[in-house]
Image (cartoon, grey):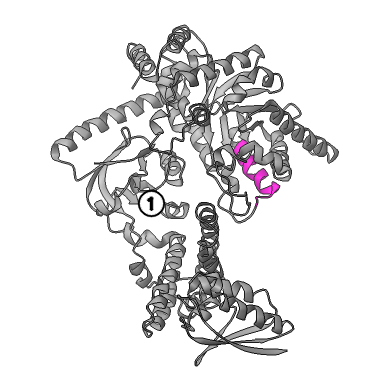
Amino acid sequence: MFKGIVASSGIAIGNALVFTKKPEEILKHKKTILSVDDEIKKFKTALEKTKIDIMNLRERIIYDIGSKEADIFVAYLQLLNDSGFSGKAEQIIKDQKVNIEFALGQVLEDYLDFFNKISDTYLKERSRDISGLIDRIIKNISDTHSIEQKEVSGKFILFADDLTPTDTVELDKTKVLGFITEKGTQTSHTAIVARALEIPALVGVRDIISNVKTGDLVILDGERGFAIVNPTPKVLNTYKEEQKKYNFKSKLLKKMKRLASKTLDNRIIELYANIEFAEEVSNVLENNASGIGLFRTEFIYINRANLPTEEEQFNIYKTVVQKMGKKPVVIRTLDIGGDKYLPYFKIPPEQNPFLGLRAIRLSLVNINILKNQIRAILRVSSFGNVRIMFPMITVVEEFLEAKKIVEEVRAELKIKKVNFDENIKIGAMIEVPSIVLLSEELAKHADFFSIGTNDLIQYTLAVDRGNEAVAKLYDNLNPAVLKLIKMAVENAHKNDLKISICGEMASDPVAAYLLVGLGVDELSMNSAAILNVKNLIRKIKFQDAIEAAENALKMKNSNEIRTYLKEKLSKREVLL
Amino acid sequence: MQFSKKVKVMNKLGFHLRAVAVFVKEAEKFKSTIKVRNNDIEADGKSIMGLMTLIAGQGSEIEIKTEGPDAKEAVNSLVKIVRNKFGEEE
């Protein structure tokens, strides 16, 4: 049994298809190509992507180890432009009309031949550097793996080290029962694709690739987060039953789509969706969300070689906003720093990145980047219902400063006679304990609040949940966290502001019950969780939830709270 | 202007990828054409693959030839880089 992180829920039973990256074989696989121009274009794209990968990697290494160790990446970057390397591969593609992989194989072979003639072991060792670079390029060519897909007939569970967007583009998605990857997180590309396709996925499953072969029978349990390779008949039968139950449940949830998100005593709790990519809007609409409660914009900035222009951003936002029609779209300004880097934008190394120059702090010292983004957001506001949200506000002044920037951009656009929504709402993310304590004052200046529970928990409990040694402390039902949420809610309501939750906590029905009881007006979560939470909302009474929250706040620890809430809910049969 | 200087490769790993990268990065700063010769093989001093194929291990004596408006500065600074073991410790 292999444990992993559930990136998309569900249960899949089927044969494995392992996406192994065996470069030697790939490099020997000669294919005649139809169009030299297309192949060269593909090669150039792969080189460009590789360049970005290497720049990212180099940043990380400089950050983690030091600049000297990162010099090898400078060499890689040079090689990508070198006439003797990429130039030579390009020539082979043109002359022999062969695929990129084969051409790169030739370059490598010539190079190795050369070194095999000599005895200097040090230099011989160096040939590995070149094959390492070739592996990276190969990874960025989309159809590298299509060779293997033919090996399995029928549907399969796909296994990979990690899947890049290019890997999944060429994949016949109708044949995939589920995804299992060794690397990745709930926000990685595989996870998003899986949720979009509504098929189960596990990410971060350690050592799985070396323990599974193409053709093995596999159970993917995307409820509990594990995979079983070649199960016994008994286990297999149990899972077939589980799968039936799960499918029954999802059918039931589908019925929820057109129903209102309303408690038995008529309190409406709006359910919103969190998105990262414009492509996710179809999911948001599919699950009938009331709007987008959190549009993370980092991904527009990450994975590229330079800053996105105002126009590029405008176009991305416009796609989303137009598709959402009259439903609100809350665009959160750039939230990098911490664990997210931009290869083209250098931040001096920090001892404590999560306590450093991240999110709004970074934007406020790089006003031009912020202004560019605000301009794009304001321009798009005339196409629908757009709101601006600033991440990681720590003190009230930061919010005022950010609002001032919005004012400046508004004035600028007015002079240029550019249309925008004059009444655009500007909200603050509540993610730092200090701003909760200061929220009474902040509420006088903000149009809405949104609590980012992931960071609020991390900063309240001083715990990095990625650190296994302390991850146990990370708990969304910790009474300290609940008290902060309650305080933020009260201060919002005192000033007639709506307050939402846009962290993972909102998608957990037990926690959602409590949040409703604490008075939270709106919940924003990944689209896939919306119907499950709606099912909960429709079966509870707001008055009961308030009472339950009051009782929970008197309890000593999260275990006690969770047990209590689960018991309350089990009586109403809301936990599917 | 044309210049040529000989220099011994002193670092332990010789003209390996990292070292070559440091060399090319410097060479690219100059307008002059730069050639590097080791025994019978000559390579473009601005091409990383070319320099790798020189197989210049520790102890080999290479010749750096430069030609162009900044040839003198180029040859001097490149010789210095090789002498300084490309910034490596051994």
Label 1: which secondary element:
loop
Residue at position x 54%, y 29% from top? A452
Q: Amino acid at mark 1?
A: Asp
Direction front: furthest residue: B90
- Relative to the observer, which residue lies in front, A325 or A311? A311
- Relative to the observer, which residue lies in front, A225 or A378? A225
- Relative to the observer, which residue lies in front, A167 or B64? B64
Q: Position of residue A190 (x, y in %)?
A: 42, 46
Which residues are drawn in magenta?
A: A307-321
Report the predominant secondary structure element of the magenta stretch: helix
Quadrant into which the C terminus of chain A falls = top left
Q: Is residue A327 left or right of residue A403?
A: left
Q: Position of residue A213 (x, y in %)?
A: 24, 54
Looking at the image, residue A460 lies above or below residue B22: above
Residue at position x 55%, y 66% from top? A74
Residue A515 in view = yes
